[in-house]
């Protein structure tokens, strides 16, 4: 009963989080190092589109529900293929634990995490993300992970709250 949740983070809220100094520097560093922006739990792709189109960063979304990935890829075909943004983003149906995040510099965790999954995923992220990588999460899930430091917290409006904490962690 606690492993599924759905809500929306509005573009204005996402932009407010990404317009802070920690993430502005992260975007610049991702560009310098040729690294990606990634989203675990990408749903129908909004956060991938946000990052790729706002910051012109190569972006990838991983989602365990293949029907959601089908929608993302359909939107990509309909609105991006044949434009200057073609090839900038991709979507894959894959469990978060199998997602290859080693070339990601900014990773968004956009899904509900139960305690058991959290411990395993936190270990994966600690082992695969390079030092200096940033993780954006809707919870304080990485507070207990010694390889990560909380770099910032921003309160923004989301579909379920007028003031929700968005946590930014540095590996």
Image (cartoon, rainbow, N blue to C red):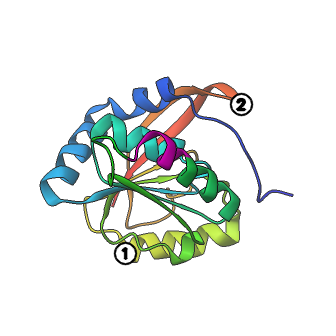
Do we see residue 134 in this rendering? Answer: no
> Which residue occupies the foreground of this view, 167 or 9?
9
Instruction: Residue 39 in the image: state x and y as whole percent.
Output: 48, 55
Quadrant assignment, res 120: bottom right
- Residue 166 to residue 170: above or below: above
| Residue under the point 25% across and 46% down | 26
Residue 160 has which mark? 2
Residue 79 within the magenta-colored segment of the rendering: yes
Mark 2 and 1 residues: CB-CB less than 8 Å, in contact? Answer: no
First along the sequence among labels 2 and 1: 1
How far, Cα to Cα, is label 2 from label 1?
31 Å
What main secondary structure does the magenta stretch of the protein show? helix
> Which residue occupies the foreground of this view, 2 or 47?
47
Which segment is the magenta one? Answer: 75-81
| Residue under the point 87% across and 58% down | 1
Say which residue label 1 marks: 128
- Residue 55 to residue 119: above or below: above
Instruction: Residue 61 in the image: state x and y as whole percent.
Output: 48, 57
- Residue 109 to residue 151: above or below: below
| Residue under the point 70% across and 59% down | 67
- Left or right: where 68 falls relative to 32: right
> Which residue occupies the foreground of this view, 109 or 53?
53
Residue 100 within the magenta-colored segment of the rendering: no
Indicate the secondary structure of the residue bearing disc 1.
helix
Instruction: Residue 36 in the image: state x and y as whole percent.
Output: 30, 57
């Amino acid at each position: 009963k606690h492993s599924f949740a759905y809500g929306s983070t509005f573009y204005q809220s996402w932009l407010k989080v990404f317009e802070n100094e920690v993430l502005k520097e992260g975007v610049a560093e991702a560009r310098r190092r040729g690294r990606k922006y990634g989203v675990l739990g990408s749903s129908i792709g909004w956060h991938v589109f946000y990052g790729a189109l706002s910051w012109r960063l190569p972006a990838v979304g991983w989602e365990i529900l293949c029907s959601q990935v089908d929608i993302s890829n359909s939107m990509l075909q309909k609105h991006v293929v044949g434009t200057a943004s073609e090839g900038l983003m991709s979507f894959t149906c894959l469990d978060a634990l199998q997602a290859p995040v080693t070339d990601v510099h900014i990773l968004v965790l956009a899904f509900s995490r139960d305690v058991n999954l959290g411990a395993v995923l936190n270990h994966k992220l600690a082992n695969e993300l390079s030092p200096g990588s940033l993780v954006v999460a809707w919870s304080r899930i990485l507070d207990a992970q010694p390889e990560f430091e909380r770099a910032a917290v921003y309160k923004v409006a989301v579909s379920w709250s007028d003031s929700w904490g968005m946590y930014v962690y540095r590996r």
